[in-house]
């Protein structure tokens, strides 16, 4: 009987561990989308539940990892800026508390949106 209790306790602990790990992994997800139109780059940032990322830090790097643009999202999770360079661009969003994501725009996409 004692052995059965230990197996049940082990099973319960393992199951609880899996559930907690899965929840914490998805808790740090944030969505970032960017597109180019009319000489500007537009970004949209939101959490999986649909809430906008307000005051998220947006940083834009060129292919040499040089910081070109930096700013914050507005109350709707939006941030836009003039095309800083005709290059591959890496747009990084830091929404605090471990919420981070990036979006890559290829040079061809940037050129097409001039």
Image: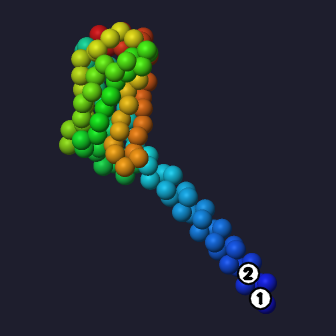
Going 68% across and 78% down the picture, which residue do you hit?
9
The residue shown at (20%, 43%) is 75
Residue at numbered disc 2: 6
Q: Residue furthest bottom?
A: 1
Dot 2: element: helix
Q: Nearer the viewer, residue 67 or 19?
A: 67
Picture quadrant where residue 78 is located: top left
Q: Position of residue 49 (x, y in %)?
A: 37, 52
Whether residue 35 is visible to the viewer of this picture, yes or no, is no
Residue 68 x/y as whole percent: 31, 19
Q: Mark 1 packing: few (<14 Cα in 10 Å), some, or many (20+)? A: few
Real-space CA distance between mark 2 and mark 1, rounded to the nearest whole angstrom: 6 Å
Task: Say whether marks 2 and 1 touch (CB < 8 Å).
Answer: yes
The N terminus lies in quadrant:
bottom right
Front-most of 11 and 70?
A: 70
Residue indicated by mark 1: 2
Q: SS of the residue at dot 1?
A: helix
Number of other residues with Cα within 10 Å of mark 2, as a class: few under 14, some 14 to 19, many 20 or more: few
Instruction: Locate the C terminus by quadrant.
Output: top left
């Amino acid at each position: 009987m004692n052995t059965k209790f230990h197996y049940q306790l082990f099973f319960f602990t393992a199951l609880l561990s899996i559930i907690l790990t899965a929840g914490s992994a998805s808790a740090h997800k944030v969505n970032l989308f960017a597109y180019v139109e009319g000489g500007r780059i537009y970004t949209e940032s939101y959490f999986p539940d649909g809430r906008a990322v307000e005051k998220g830090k947006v940083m834009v790097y060129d292919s040499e990892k040089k910081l070109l643009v930096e700013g914050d999202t507005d109350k709707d999770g939006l941030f836009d800026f003039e095309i800083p360079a005709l290059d591959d661009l890496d747009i990084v969003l830091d929404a605090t508390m471990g919420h981070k994501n990036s979006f890559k725009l290829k040079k061809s996409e940037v050129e097409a949106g001039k």
